[in-house]
């Protein structure tokens, strides 16, 4: 989640040039481009849930990911709706972290403003039984902060992995998620390689979705350049009416089927509808104009960072570069900034559009 920013300070591209050490560990984390879906999940009537330490209900499909943090017990769906999301992954690395162990218990972070990554490193040390250990954590992240692209979660996940690597300790994705949410308050599910319906403020998988993201050509757009981004954690937790929860039930059901069938058009339709529903919570500058652009030939839909300023126009890759270029010109006429593009799909390397 994006809530931490350098406030004018530069993130040095050479930040990882730390004196070599045989006691160093390296950690990488993925990145994402906002969400395909964001809303609320309510357990179907009578579902068996996991009760974690905070008493939060987690769907049956989450058992494998959450087995270390709770025990199975029947909990009525009256426990209440849970905030949920499905992210659009970008097929390239986000943050890279290096942790150089030290002999004393002090912890230094470079750059110093990345306090969430430092918090995550300390939590990771506690988790692996190294409470008295310390070191130098250096984080380098190419993801812009404040746009809704999950730069802070990327830092946090890379930091946890670097600490564990430095100590030769293993850690699974579910454990990383639980440490990350403790460090940050709300996170993105970039630690999971497969598609998941995720509770960002609880660090829990609600459902695992087989199939994954199909192929899209995504044109990335900053809808409000110069606005300074959005502080995610300062936003109030949404409240939903019964009618709105019904809408999200339907949307989640459609997304579940679309992922299973790897149906690009259906996933794009879910993303577009989720973006429309989000306008009551955080209106996006020029949203109507962007929505109109989805009617261009080859454009399948629109996805957004639901708590940011970035949007992605989703194209059928078979249509090729020409369709995206036509829309790019229209986007620039709206005084929005094109941030480039990438292709999604299994095994897809990042590719500029």
Image (spheres, rainbow, N blue to C red):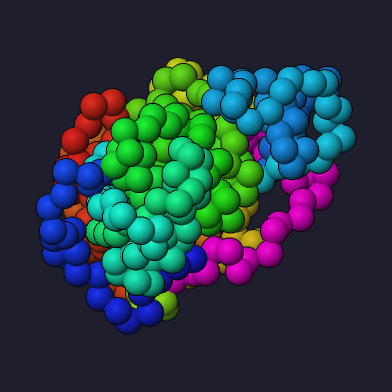
Q: Relative to 125, does residue 194 appear above or below in the rendering?
A: above
Q: Residue at x 75, y 30 (%)?
A: 51
Q: Quadrant of residue 124?
A: top left
Q: Residue at x 67, y 20 (%)?
A: 60
Left or right: 175 in relation to 25: right
Q: Relative to 47, does residue 8 appear above or below in the rendering?
A: below
Left or right: 352 in relation to 73: left
Magenta-drawn segment: 229-252
Left or right: 207 in relation to 335: right
Q: How many marks?
A: 0
In the image as oriented, which residue stretches furthest toward the bottom? 8
Observer-nearest of 172 and 336: 172
> Would you say residue 243 is visible in this rendering?
yes
Q: Residue at x 19, y 36 (%)?
A: 349
Magenta stretch encompasses residue 199: no
Q: Residue at x 61, y 69 (%)?
A: 234
Q: Quadrant of residue 91?
A: top left
Observer-nearest of 313 and 205: 205
> Would you say residue 305 is visible in this rendering?
no
x and y percentages locating residue 139 in the rendered image: 28, 58
x and y percentages locating residue 269 in the rendered image: 49, 38
Q: Relative to 274, does residue 13 appear above or below in the rendering?
A: below
x and y percentages locating residue 9 in the rendered image: 30, 79
x and y percentages locating residue 333 in the rendered image: 29, 71
């Amino acid at each position: 989640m994006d809530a931490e920013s350098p406030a004018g300070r530069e993130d040095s591209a050479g930040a990882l040039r730390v004196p070599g050490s045989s006691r160093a560990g390296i950690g990488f984390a993925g990145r994402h481009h906002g969400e395909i879906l964001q809303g609320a999940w309510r357990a179907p009537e009578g579902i068996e849930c996991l009760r974690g330490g905070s008493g939060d209900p987690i769907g049956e499909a989450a058992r494998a990911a959450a087995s270390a943090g709770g025990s199975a017990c029947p909990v009525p769906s009256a426990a209440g709706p849970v905030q949920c999301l499905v992210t659009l992954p970008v097929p390239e690395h986000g943050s890279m972290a290096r942790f150089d162990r030290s002999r004393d218990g002090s912890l230094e972070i470079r750059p110093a403003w990345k306090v969430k990554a430092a918090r995550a490193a300390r939590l990771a040390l506690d988790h692996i039984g190294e409470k008295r250990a310390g070191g130098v954590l250096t984080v380098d992240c190419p993801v812009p902060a404040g746009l809704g692209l999950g730069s802070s979660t990327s830092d946090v996940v890379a930091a946890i992995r670097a600490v564990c690597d430095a100590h030769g300790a293993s850690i699974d994705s579910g454990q990383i998620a639980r440490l990350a949410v403790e460090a940050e308050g709300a996170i993105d599910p970039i630690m999971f390689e497969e598609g998941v319906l995720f509770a960002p403020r609880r660090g829990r998988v609600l459902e695992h979705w087989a199939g994954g993201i199909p192929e899209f050509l995504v044109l990335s757009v900053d809808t409000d350049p110069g606005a300074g981004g959005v502080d995610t954690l300062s936003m109030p937790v949404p409240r939903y009416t019964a009618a709105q929860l019904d809408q999200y039930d339907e949307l989640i059901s459609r997304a579940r089927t679309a992922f299973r069938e790897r149906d690009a058009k259906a996933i794009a339709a879910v993303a577009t509808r989720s973006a429309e529903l989000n306008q009551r919570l955080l209106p996006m500058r020029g949203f109507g104009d962007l929505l109109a652009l989805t009617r261009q030939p080859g454009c399948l839909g629109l996805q957004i960072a639901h708590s940011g300023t970035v949007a992605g126009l989703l194209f059928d890759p078979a249509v090729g570069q020409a369709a995206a270029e036509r829309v790019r010109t229209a986007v620039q006429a709206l005084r929005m900034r094109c941030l480039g593009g990438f292709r999604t799909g299994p095994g897809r390397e990042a590719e500029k559009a």
